[in-house]
Structure formats: C-alpha cells, structure tokens
Image (tube, grey):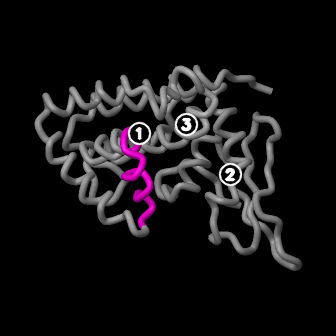
Amino acid sequence: MTTYSAASVIAAERTALVGTLNEAGPAAPTLCEGWQTRHLLAHLILRETQPLVAAGVMGGPLGKRTERLTNEYAQQLADPASYRLAVQKFADLPGYGGMRKHWPVADAAMNTLEYLVHTEDVRRAAGDLSPREVPAETQQKIWDDVRSRGRLLAGKSYPEGLVLEAPGYSPSTATIQRPKPGKVATVLSGQPAELVLYLFGRQDVAQVKKI
C-alpha cells in the first residue's frame, strides 16, 4: 500500500494547478460551463478568502451573489498581467486560518479533489485528454477520499448500485452503493484520479471503463 503525506499531496496538486493556469492564460476554455480560466481563477480565490461566497457555489440562497461576485472578479482578470498576479496570489494563499501551514491534513481533505478536477478542467478543455502523471501517493490519497466520499459524489445516479475498481491500489475495489436485490451494480474501473473526474461529472473526458 502506498503511503502519503497530506502536506506533500496538497502541495503537489496546488503546484500543478498553478502551473496549468499560468500556462493557459486568462481566456482559455475550461470544462466548467460558461467559464474561461479567469472565471475559474476567480472562483478559486474567492472560495479560499470569502467563506460566504464559497457557500454559494452549490447554489441556494447565496448562489446568485456568488455568481455575480465571481463574474465581477473575472472581469478584472481579463488583462494578462492582472491574471498572472492573481495566479500568484492564489499560489500564496494561506488557506482558512492558516490551514496550509498549521492543518495540512484538513487542507488536503478540503482541496485535493478540488485542485485535481480544476487542473483537468483546463487541460482537457484544451484537448489534452491523456491522463496526467499524478504521483502514486496522490493517487492513493485520492482513492481514500473517493472510497469515503463516493456515495456523496455519486448521488442518485446509480440506483442499481455502484462499485469502483482501482487496479494496483489498496483495496482494489470499493462498494459505494450496494446493489438492490435482483440488480447488478455498475462497475467503474480506472485510476483514482480518473474515477474522480467521472464522479465529478466529467464523464466525456475521464479515462474510465464502465462495466
């Protein structure tokens, strides 16, 4: 079984996301509907600096305010110089209450999947559908997260049941939703990072085998 350090895992994924955003520039497409990279960057910064804004990401009473503030901030980042400064600002953020320094386990729990998915939102929208080389320790952390949060991520999309397979990782399978009597569960097989993309709604670009 691959072991991992939460601090190194989250640092690696933040570095990958920062590099991807810098390389893409402010007007690149993303897999997030209606968003260019500047919108994604605005979302990332607001999410980590304004909790009330972050609370509206999933909609609800704060949803319209969050959308408005994200779009307003994104307009300020259309200029490449302003965008580069904002990418650096994101790279230097301490997290809630200095989380990155003082509570790396909490930082990794909150942000590993977020950073992974948004890195791929940029890469794969640009046409690079090949899986990124994600370190083994990060893959194991992702797999642990998916196994513990899989039911929440899957929602009600698999009423017949859902099993995930990640060959080479421990354990290699995880029953996320037990099949109902007389039903056969859907099996999704792939690397942990690809399974995350699939469960986050990026089915068209995730390298996952559905059985």
Q: Estimate how packed mark 3 is, as few (under 14), some (14 to 19) or many (20 or more) residues with alpha carbons within 10 Å.
A: many
Mark sitting earlier along the chain (2/3): 3
Q: Distance between the residues labelled 2 and 1?
A: 21 Å
Rendering coords of residue 98 (x, y %): 48, 26
Residue 59, by quadrant, is bottom left
The residue that appears at 65% across and 45% down in the rendered structure is 190
Label 1 with label 3: CB-CB less than 8 Å: no
Reply yes or no: does residue 9 show up in magenta. Answer: no
Q: Distance between the residues labelled 1 and 3?
A: 13 Å
Rendering coords of residue 95 (x, y %): 46, 31
Q: Main secondary structure of the magenta part?
A: helix
Residue 152, by quadrant, is bottom right
Specify the label residue 199 is tagged with. none
The amino acid type, in three-letter code, at marker 2 is Arg
Viewed as shown, does residue 50 lie left or right of 204? left
The answer to which of 93 and 14 lies nearer the viewer is 93
Magenta-colored span: 47-59
Q: In which quarter of the image is the C terminus?
A: bottom right
Residue to which mark 1 is pinned: 48
Residue to which mark 3 is pinned: 112
Mark sitting earlier along the chain (2/1): 1
Rendering coords of residue 68 (x, y %): 24, 59
For label 3, the SS is: helix
